[in-house]
Image: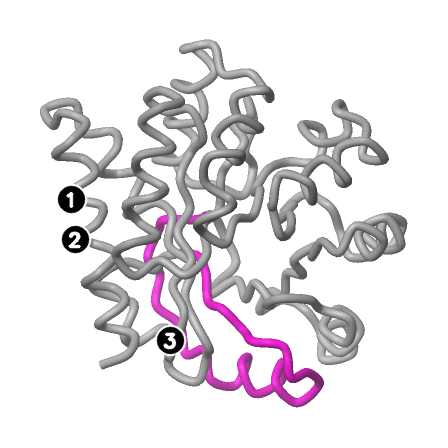
Amino acid sequence: MKNLVAYITSGYPEKSFSVDLALALGENGVDTLELGVPFSDPVADGPLIEKANHKALELGFKFQDLLEISQAVAPKVDTLWMGYFNSFYQQNMEKLLPLARKIGVNGLIIPDVPHEEALLYKDLFTRNNLANISFVAPTDSEARIKEVVQDAQKFIYMVAYTGITGSGKAEDLQPFLDSIKKYTQTPVYVGFGVNAKTAKEKVKGADGVIVGSAFIDILLQEDLNYSQKITKCSSLAQTIKNEING
């Protein structure tokens, strides 16, 4: 069974909605939830996620909101925090990671921290039994791929192309996948540009997909009420889960 990871922007459009949406996704095919931490300059994310980030901040998102959403969701859905390093660093990593573990969060995804810098926090993550998700990109050399994936935990975030999330660009991923799997038994999940139309193709040879912009696109549709947004996101999750396992 191939896995589906779903990203949502925490606190957008509001905290209680994030909880309801997260739980609904967990009941409709999502295996792992990425709770995104709104940030003013989300450099790896496309325009949809960037817009949702800015809207959440305008609505007054605070880091405490992430903690409260996580407390409600993590006991029921495998939960990761996805955010930029400054958001976590400001909370004091020595205090934050034990708190994350206590809440039930299983790991962090920090796209702006290079592998070399992530190693500085390896012992802290290990002590708290948290995964620090590793990224690999098509621009990485074989030597670098080997180095990055050898200690990868939970899953490897395989960037499907060089660019930002949500652009849906097509590439032949099989040679890239082969070069990753040569050095690791850790599952490899494909992210960037995955949606209902592309999921079946992108998951070939991989162990799962990571979907963000396709869900955020629904959340940004102002003509839908909260219930309709949750229904559409749940339906999308079911569709993608069926596509990648069809």
- Given contact means CB atoms under 8 Å apart, are the residues at marks 2 and 1 in contact? yes
| Residue 198, image x, y percentages | 27, 66
**Quarter occupied by the N terminus:** bottom left
Q: Is residue 56 left or right of residue 115?
A: left
Q: Nearer the viewer, mark 3 or mark 2?
A: 2
Which amino acid does the dot numbered 1 rest on?
Lys
Marks 1 and 3, the one that precedes in the sequence: 3
Q: Is residue 120 left or right of residue 188?
A: right
| Residue 91, image x, y percentages | 75, 24
- In the displayed structure, 73 sits above or below 125; it is above
Q: Nearer the viewer, mark 1 or mark 3?
A: 1
The residue carrying mark 3 is: 203
The residue carrying mark 1 is: 232
Instruction: Say what secondary structure mark 2 lies in.
Output: helix
Magenta-colored span: 165-192
Which amino acid does the dot numbered 3 rest on?
Val
Residue 23 disc label: none
Along the viewing direction, whichever of 195 and 142 lies nearer the viewer: 195
